[in-house]
Image (cartoon, rainbow, N blue to C red):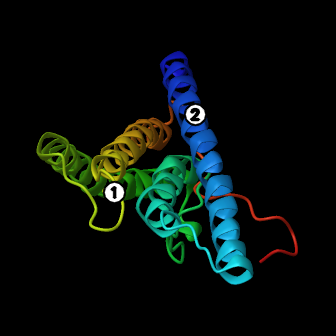
């Protein structure tokens, strides 16, 4: 049974790693664009007219949706462990499976609806209002891609948590380990 988990984990992890590289590139581009815009605005009174729409409508969106699934993999999303931290490992895994299933229902719905919003924007050739008519569809595309990948991660985590709850595999850690002295 762990062979299937390992193969699915490897595939999803590769997709998450690609998404994280894209998110990191977007972050660097966002920092460089913003710094350049500030420098040009205040030093030369000649701002980049395209900087704000590109950063807000594309780069921040890519950054968030590129990193959301990897954050789930590492257990970096907000969670309340007041009760579950005191449970035995199998029951803890079962609670984690229910929690991931609820999250999957919401993320799957958002991904599904996001496909429709993206498609409508693509077909209607929607653009942002402003000096430059930037297309809207690239930022809309990131919603189903990011939440779709997150949904796959959640499906795998649900399967692993259920398998751990019935004793087939070792339990997954529920959150990222925080280095000593950081809390």
Q: What residue is pinned by disc 2?
A: 18
Horizontal and vertical percent position of residue 59: 51, 56
Q: Nearer the viewer, residue 145 or 151?
A: 145
Counting labels gives 2
Which of 69 and 23 lies nearest the eye of the viewer? 23
Element at label 2: helix
Q: Residue at x 61, y 36 (%)?
A: 17
The answer, for residue 168, to whether it is visible in the render is yes
**Given this view, does label 2 or label 1 mark the residue nearer the observer?**
2
Of 182 and 148, which appears nearest the observer? 148
Disc 1 secondary structure class:
helix
Q: Sequence-wise, which precedes: disc 2 or disc 1?
A: 2
Q: Position of residue 77 (x, y in %)?
A: 53, 63
Instruction: Verify CB contact (< 8 Å) between mark 2 and mark 1.
Output: no
Q: Nearer the viewer, residue 65 or 180?
A: 65
Q: Is residue 179 left or right of residue 86?
A: right
Q: Which quadrant holds residue 96?
A: bottom left
Residue 7: x and y in percent read 53, 19
Q: Residue pushed farthest right? A: 181
Q: Residue at x 49, y 69 (%)?
A: 52
Q: Residue at x 46, y 43 (%)?
A: 161
Image point 52% across, 24% down: which residue?
11
Which residue does the numbered mark 1 point to in the structure image? 103
Q: Is residue 171 visible?
A: no
Q: In the picture provided, is 100 more to the left or to the right than 62?
A: left
Quarter of the rendering occupied by the C terminus: bottom right
Q: Is residue 64 above or below residue 112?
A: below
- The CA distance from mark 2 to mark 1 is 23 Å
Q: Quadrant of residue 43?
A: bottom right
User: Which dot marks residue 165?
Assistant: none
Dot 1 crowding, Cα within 10 Å, few <14, some 14–19, many 20+: some
């Amino acid at each position: 049974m762990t062979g299937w988990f390992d193969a699915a984990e490897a595939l999803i992890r590769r997709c998450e790693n690609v998404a994280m590289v894209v998110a990191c590139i977007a972050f660097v581009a966002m920092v460089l664009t913003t710094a350049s815009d500030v420098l040009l605005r205040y030093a030369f009174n000649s701002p980049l007219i395209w900087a704000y729409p590109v950063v807000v409508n594309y780069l921040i969106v890519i950054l968030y949706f590129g990193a959301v699934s990897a954050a789930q993999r590492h257990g970096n999303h907000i969670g309340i462990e007041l009760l579950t931290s005191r449970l035995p490992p199998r029951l803890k895994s079962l609670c984690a499976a229910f929690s991931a299933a609820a999250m999957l229902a919401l993320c799957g719905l958002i991904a599904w609806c996001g496909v429709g919003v993206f498609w409508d924007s693509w077909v209607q050739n929607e653009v942002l209002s402003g000096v430059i008519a930037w297309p809207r569809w690239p930022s809309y595309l990131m919603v189903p891609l990011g939440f779709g990948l997150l949904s796959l991660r959640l499906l795998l985590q649900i399967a692993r948590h259920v398998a751990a709850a019935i004793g087939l595999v070792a339990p997954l850690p529920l959150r990222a380990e925080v280095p000593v002295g950081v809390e």
